[in-house]
Image (cartoon, grey):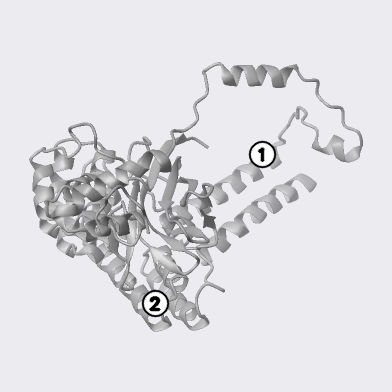
Amino acid sequence: MTDGPGYHPMVRRLLDGELTLQDLPPELQSEGEAALRSILPRCAPPPVSFSPSFEQRVMAAVRSRPRPRPRNAWGWLGEVREIRLQLRPRLLALGVLAGIVLVALTSRLRSGSLAGTAAGGGTDSVYVRFVLYAPKVSSVALAGSFNEWDPTRTPLVPAGETGVWTVTLPLAPGQHTYAFVIDGQRWLPDPAAPAVDDGFGHHNSVMTVTATGGHTS
Amino acid sequence: MRAPVIALLLACGLAAPLRGQADTPIRLEGRVPPAVAEAVRAIADSVARAGLPVRPLFRKALEGGAKGVPADRIIAAVGTVASQLAQAAQALRSEHVARDPDAIEAGGYAINAGLSAGQVAELARGNRPPQAVAASLQSAGTLAALGVPPGQAVALVHEWISTGRSPDQVLLLPQQLQAAMARGASPAQAASGIARGEQPGASGNHPEPPSHAQDRSHRP
């Protein structure tokens, strides 16, 4: 149970992840929101930022280092070198044909079932950090539409003994549904995100990732 | 003749995996009971023959399998998804987006959330670039899933599009709604407030949901 500064028992259950904001009665909504907001600084520290000259200094240091000489045949194979290509007419024609076949195939795939689900169709990803306050549990994982609902693929990492679990992953812009998996068994919707019916008698959380890296829901 | 042969082999070698992906969008083996996998493949075959996306079916099956849902309920849920995709495709056919798998999938999601096929068609009809039909449908669907009456959800998204809001603003309508609901408004009241231009976070202290935060854009 969370020890909050005199929080109502239902608000403490919200902080423990047992309830969502929507589960709280209207008179406790603002207290619940304030409680969630109070743990935000602990849960989501600001991202590390580098000075503009950082990349230049790193690249200057890399370029100043001598290029290692290959020691053996394997080293020679992996060495970066300039390659000159000279296409012959027959090979060029065959290459163009192969290109047309590939374009036709990939066009079919795009218009079929394999197209991405991100609204807007953009391919850029946005890094999203997920944080859950779940003390006294042994594991927390994330499962959702972005990882084929596989709870083994995206484990959250505990931040010491604080009870805070986090993971950061790149997601395509668009809408994603997900839930946390506690101790490999208990499925828990995100207490701070909109929840929708999952068709199995439970709820999933919905998150919106925007291409501009603005907000989530 | 060595070079043409190499080019041909390259083309075939690249094409084969692509064709393989088309046949098996998501692997079900080991993730759901064999009976579920068989039933889902049968449903997916007929859905694919109708030109509809099959990935949502596999995803729903995997979700059910991961959650330990009984086999018959998973199959029923997958059948429901298939039916909703078909309804969405039918509704979108007259709006010239029936071939867009994202729009069909989003239409199915919106129908599942409570929108009628007519409302899906209406939303697609009122859509205008740069807004993606799929994004409008997703947004309206989530508003409805959060409790906004479907007609009001459609009207709100319509209004946002017609007043030239950006695609991101339309996508983030559910977040605005959630913020207003957190202050005690009912879903319908919150939607009305947003339509009137009331900003739940106008005071500048609107909190980002604590459980996740976008860090920065990544351009691979």
Of A159 and B123, the residue lying toward us = A159
The residue depicted at 37 percent of the width and 55 percent of the height is: A2
SS type, badge 2: helix
Report in which chain the residue with disc 1 lies: A
Question: On residue A92, which mark appears?
Answer: 1
Residue B218 on image: x %, y % = 48, 36
Residue B176, image quadrant:
top left
Q: Is residue B165 visible?
A: yes
Q: Residue furthest front?
A: A6
As drawn, B95 above or below B114: above
Residue A65 on image: x %, y % = 77, 20
Is residue A90 rendered to the left or right of residue A158?
right
Q: Amino acid at mark 2?
A: Ile
Quarter of the picture containing the N terminus of chain A is: bottom left
Q: Which residue is mark 2?
A: B74
Residue B132, image quadrant:
top left
Report in which chain the residue with disc 2 lies: B
Of B5 and B21, the residue lying toward us = B21
The residue depicted at 54 percent of the width and 58 percent of the height is: A153
